Amino acid sequence: MPENIFESILTSVAANPLLAPAHPVRVGCAGWNIPRQAIAEFAPARNHLERYSRVFDCCEINSSFYRPHKKETWERWAHSVPPGFQFSVKAPRTITHEAKLNCNPGMLSVFLEQIKHMRDKLGPILFQLPPSFGFDHARAREFLSLLRTNYSGDVVWEARHASWFDVQADDLLGEFQIARVAADPACVPAARQPGGLANLAYFRLHGSPRRYFSSYSGDFLNTLAAQLAILGERARVWCVFDNTGSGAAIQNALELARKLGRVAGNTMVETH
């Protein structure tokens, strides 16, 4: 789609709230750390999470990938944010990287019991696979069957091997109501677009060309904003900036949210 059409979409949405996406487009970051250069954008509060949650309506928890958290920690996070805010939670590396999905039911159950303490603040579970982990239909089906036997909520799947981006893999994810992540940088062109479950789209922007450090340009964010607005007509949309290494994530998320009419100053705009 030509860039001027994307600009036209954004202009129309900004001028007429009735043209806003049918579903809310959630914009946030991996973690809620606020770098010094962005602190003026956020009203004072007791801690970074409270300040962050007054501007954004979602956040991705990555620390759960590395270690479990106590019940009190999950509950404190959930109680620190306003109604309507949600967290996505990254599944433990013991499941995705060490067991490579060939985990015992107890390993999965322990994680699922932990995140229950988020209650209505829990958004999608994120499963990120190792770049070397290719698509194995039998193993994937066995794990997804186990997962869906124990959990019915939203799940997003970040595959990073080219073999996951074909019809067979996409159909399997759709069968189990799993949304495939749209990622940048992408391992193959198809990885830039969401797949699997049609009514949930989840974007993870890691920074490009330098992963975790590079900021995204205004042109990139204009095109992305229009794409998200279009997707919002049929799907619930999340967009998470993971380019946190230089503090670019917060700035990019603020700019994108403004393009979508989601923030004004340091107050979330209620569009729904």
Image (cartoon, grey):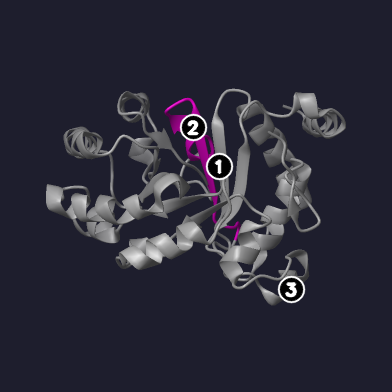
**Quarter of the figure with residue 50:** bottom right
- Which element carries disc 1, helix, strand or loop? strand
The N terminus, quarter of image? top right
Q: Is residue 33 visible?
A: no
Q: Which residues are magenta?
A: 190-209
Residue drawn at point x = 52 percent, y = 63 percent: 31
Spot occupied by residue 240 in the image (x, y as percentages of width and height): 56, 51
Query: Real-space Cα distance between discs 2 and 3?
Result: 33 Å
Q: In the picture, residue 156 is in which quadrant?
A: top left
Callout 1 environment at 10 Å: few (<14), some (14 to 19), or many (20+)?
Answer: many
| In this view, 10 is above or below 211 | above
Which residue corresponds to the image point at 72% horizontal and 41% vertical from the top-left? 270
Q: Which residue is mark 1?
A: 238
Gap between marks 1 and 2 measured at Cα: 8 Å
Sequence-earlier tag: 1 or 2: 2
Q: Is residue 122 above or below residue 173?
A: below
User: Which residue, given by chain and number where applicable, does mark 2 sit on?
Assistant: 200
Q: Which badge, 1 or 3, comes first in the chain's sequence?
A: 3
Pinpoint residue 7: horizontal percent, then vertical percent: 82, 34
* Mark number displayed over residue 37: 3
Labels in figure, total: 3
Q: Amino acid at mark 1?
A: Trp
Q: Is residue 30 at all visible to an observer of this figure?
A: yes
Q: Nearer the viewer, residue 152 or 79?
A: 79
> Residue drawn 42% across and 34% down?
179
The front one of 236 and 82 is 82
Position of the C terminus, as image quadrant, is top right
